[in-house]
Amino acid sequence: MAGEVISLLRPQLLGRMTQRAVAETLKTHGPMSRADVARTTGISPTTVSSAVVQVLKAGFVEETDAEITGPGRPGKILRLARDSVQVIGASVEPDWCALVVGGLDGTTTPQQARRFPTPTTYAKLLAEIEKQARPWLDRPGVRTLGFGLSLPGLIDPTGEVAAFSPNFHQTDRQRPGRDLAERFKLPTVLIQESDALCLAESRAHNVGDLCIIDYTGGLGAGGIAGGRLLNRHLGLPTELGHLTAVPGGRKCGCGNLGCLETVATDTAFARLISEAMGEPLTVEEAFEAVKEARVDARPHLYTVLDYLAVAVAAVGNLYAPPLIVLHGRLLDLDPELVRTLEAKAKPRLLAPLRDRCRLARSRSSKAQGALAGILDHLFEELGPLLPTTGL
């Protein structure tokens, strides 16, 4: 009996694996013909053609008007769908929310983005996200396949509950992924913001091994190895910012004193600038004052960089990644600051790691990371990866 069940399941499973292989090949190598997909994957042309029929039906792949010319019958070019289908990514942060929309190839443009102040209650947050997304959802002739949501703080291991955020309590103990899925009637993925950045930066830098440090408001970290997010329970390594850096120091949003994120973030820098100017400033206003040279920011800048170097060394010593990507505004003040930070961090790294960990500024956003999160979910739903020499 068990053998009969396996024999019935195997063709279906192999079919799904082949469909995944077709989609992954187009994601990795870009548009190509059926024959090129077969050559790249090592799968027979007949099997590839059958799989292509299914992914075309599912809306994952489109045929373009361009044709491959040459000996024999002309062949249509296949690509991941971007005209007939779309996915939406949203990021929620204490001050701002952002939405982006893109095709299954993950491409977005600045014109395809929305930004709005973060509402003060959970109900208003859900309503505003729906309001901002609705024009895209209602686009005629375009089907939305899924929605990704990036969120700060601790997400429970099931990905269902936003357990706790030290700096953003509207979503504590809520299920925003499930609640938005019910509103949109779409597959929805909830992803921790550091994980979202890992996915986005992995694509942007075209590498499968890196760590990120997000120093915008809080101080978060995440890692990706072999193209896979590092597994963890709740906050490890995400909540790097809640290591104590200044015993008895400033009170943190988590309730403790002297956490690293109170001294090593854009928010910490803005607070120092506010104190220097003798007036309360938002982060935006503080950075504008620095750019306009209305205050001598150098001593405050180097104070924050010293603490940020501690964070960089901690991530380097724990995970020894070849690349650490820094996400925030501080390093944008001067392109050379990333080298300054590297010089401050290197002495704190273990000697064998000092030449291994390269630093770089981020090239993406958390909303793009949320988009990457829903794309990964949709690809995994196609089927398991099929081991081939071409992928």
Image (cartoon, rainbow, N blue to C red):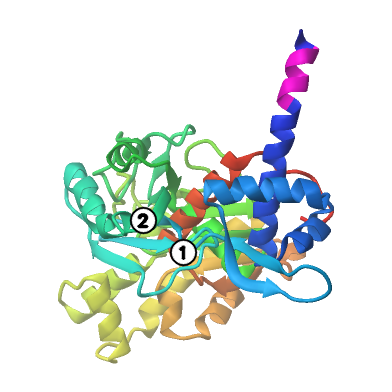
Q: Are marks 2 and 1 in contact (CB under 8 Å)?
A: no
Quarter-wise, where is residue 68 in the image? bottom right
- The answer to whether residue 137 is magenta is no
Q: Quadrant of the N terminus?
A: top right
Q: CA distance from mark 2 to mark 1?
A: 20 Å
The crowding category of the residue bearing disc 1, from other C-alpha atoms within 10 Å (few below 14, some 14 to 19, many at least 20), is: some
Q: Position of residue 257 (x, y in %)?
A: 33, 49
Residue 290 higher or lower than 34, as above or below: below
Q: Quadrant of the C terminus?
A: bottom right
Residue extending furthest toward the bottom: 293
Task: Name the residue carrying label 1.
Answer: 83
The crowding category of the residue bearing disc 2, from other C-alpha atoms within 10 Å (few below 14, some 14 to 19, many at least 20), is: many
- In this view of the protein, can residue 18 be seen by the observer? yes
Question: What's the magenta region?
Answer: 3-9
Q: Position of residue 249 (x, y in %)?
A: 33, 55
Task: Name the residue carrying label 2.
Answer: 90
Q: In terms of depth relative to the viewer, which is nearer, 25 or 128?
A: 25
- In this view of the protein, can residue 321 be seen by the observer? no
Q: Please, what is the three-letter code of the amino acid marked with disc 1?
A: Asp
Q: Residue at x 74, y 36 (%)?
A: 14
